[in-house]
Amino acid sequence: MSDATAFHEEEVIGKVYDARLFRRLIRYVKPYRARALGAVALIVLSSLLQLVGPLATAIALDLYMRPAGEAPARQHSISVAARWFQAELANRGVALTAVQGVAAMALVYLGALLLTFVVLYLQSYLMQMMGQLIMYDLRREVFGRFQRLPVAYFDKNPIGRLVTRVTSDVDALNELFTAGLVSIFGDVVLLAGIVGVLFWLNWKLALVTFAILPLLLALTVWFKVRARQSYREVRVKIARINAFLQEHITGMPVVQLFGRERRAFDDFAEVNLEHRDANVRAIFYYAVYYPAVEAITALGIGLIVWYGGLSVLAGALSIGALIAFLQYAQRFYQPLADLSDKYNILQAAMAASERTFRVLDTPVEIEAPAEPYAPERVRGAISFEGVSFAYKAGEPVLHDVGFSVEPGETLAIVGHTGAGKSTLANLLLRFYDVAEGRVSVDGVDVRRWDLRVLRQSIGLVLQDVFLFSGTVERNIRLDEERVDAERIRWASREVQALPFIERLPGGFESVVRERGAGFSVGQKQLIAFARALAFDPKILILDEATSSIDTETEQLIQQALDRLLVGRTSLVIAHRLSTIQKADRILVLHKGRVRELGSHQELLARRGIYYRLYQLQFKDQEVAV
């Protein structure tokens, strides 16, 4: 399996039932235990009500629908029940004709059906409501965990998989609570009631009824083993489809630019074919299981008709008891036939819970200490002291990096691609923690800072700007109450974004679609500038922030930055050296090490790495030393 395939592959499904996971799931029911207990009581009531219909049918047949002059059967439990019913009517002075008796039993049957409907409705409503509340709690908890996990976690996990944790996995758990557990519990109560009634009616015929259970058990075990493997394959293949679609839909411009439509189509067809074949294999087991269950249950019904019919002819069983047996047998076999669906629900829920809890159990490696440093005023002094860092073990990105930036100073950072420039920003924001050394703000290690205070003190503008769906105003404000409309307008004016925003159909209320579709790269960067400045950060990081803006707009922004950077500590990461010549100092990174540090003119005079970079960008111009 390739690394790319393994990256997108779904996790292996664990045990079908895991007591540890199950106990943990039950904890989510505790806040709603009143609803759960009410649903359980209703389940028991509905199961008892389902026992009424066949008994009413049997009483009607035995008491009121026997041919005239026929004596009751000699010894069978239903005659005892019928005589008891008749005696109760006599004690109350009620004498029913055959027509009235049949009508009374029909009303009892109908009443039981209607009451069962009401009880099942209430039970379903309670369980569905509880399931929705549990889903709400789980999704909040998972999303809350996502917000606290380090950026490194999202580097290692594809977006499609993480979205699945919050959507389909939580849905599988909801189905467990609303359909799986409830249905299984209700089936157990119903089956126990039917078993008791059948043995009460006629224990010999009850044994005949249950004679097919070994066959059903063997078939179910066979299906369980086969279906589990096929179910695992289907889950793995659908995970690959989701990952492939997410990756290629996001990268569709690249696919079209390089004419990879046919190759991408063929790759998708292969992944889709594997998913189809896995489903076909699963369908085969279902296609065998359900007809086999029908055949076995039909055999059971046949045995009841055969043995029960002989008993009726021998006078050992009434026709009413036989009809009741047939009705109860059908109700007994149906839950057993549905075991496969309940098995799949349980299996999906256990797999989903394992994956969901894996997210919730992921340690939050980057968080504020117990007593965080949270000053009321941030000066903006930055210091890197002997910092070494690697995203992957054995592949260091920074080696013993050390420098400092005074409050209000602008430090430009240049270097070849992969030199570690953006990593400095990531470490300062504490998206990652250093392996060696120390990163500090105002002389305090960032690991001691309150994360919220630290990051609110730093404004960041990236080359690849991310805009949320909503409005322009909301993308600048980010729902922060202290950023009012006047400040949004001021920030937009200062970064030269106001003219193009006012030209939009709705101005600041113009709709922003997913990922800022419809806005140019330059416009998105101007909005990001306005967003950063609206929050008035003490430290400003510009990571290739002007690389996609035309020359005229860049000049306007540079004029604004000349004013706005005053009083702010600024790190300007750039490839285009024309944008950093006015920086107080320039730091040159090369292969993760600080190689040069000084002003623009000082570095040109040294004729080192910065001098060569400058020559490459301005080779047609005379280099002034």
Image (cartoon, grey):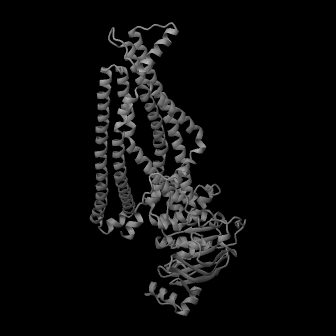
**Residue at the image position 49 percent from the left and 56 percent from the top:** 354
Direction from residue 477 to residue 506 in the image, left or right: left
Residue 466 percent coordinates (x, y) = 49, 63
Residue 63 percent coordinates (x, y) = 40, 14
Direction from residue 213 to residue 398 in the image, left or right: right
Direction from residue 540 to residue 272 in the image, left or right: left
**Residue at the image position 32 percent from the left and 26 percent from the top:** 308
Please name whichever residue, 55 or 161, is drawn nearer the observer in this view of the structure.
55
Residue 489 percent coordinates (x, y) = 59, 59
**Residue at the image position 60 percent from the left and 65 percent from the top:** 533
Looking at the image, is 462 positioned above or below residue 314?
below
Please name whichever residue, 369 or 562, is drawn nearer the observer in this view of the structure.
369
Q: Is residue 551 visible?
A: yes
Q: Is residue 106 visible?
A: no
Residue 500 percent coordinates (x, y) = 49, 61
Figure quadrant of the N terminus: bottom left
Looking at the image, is 342 positioned above or below residue 481?
above
Looking at the image, is 106 positioned above or below residue 373?
above
Figure quadrant of the C terminus: bottom right
Q: Quadrant of residue 15?
A: bottom left
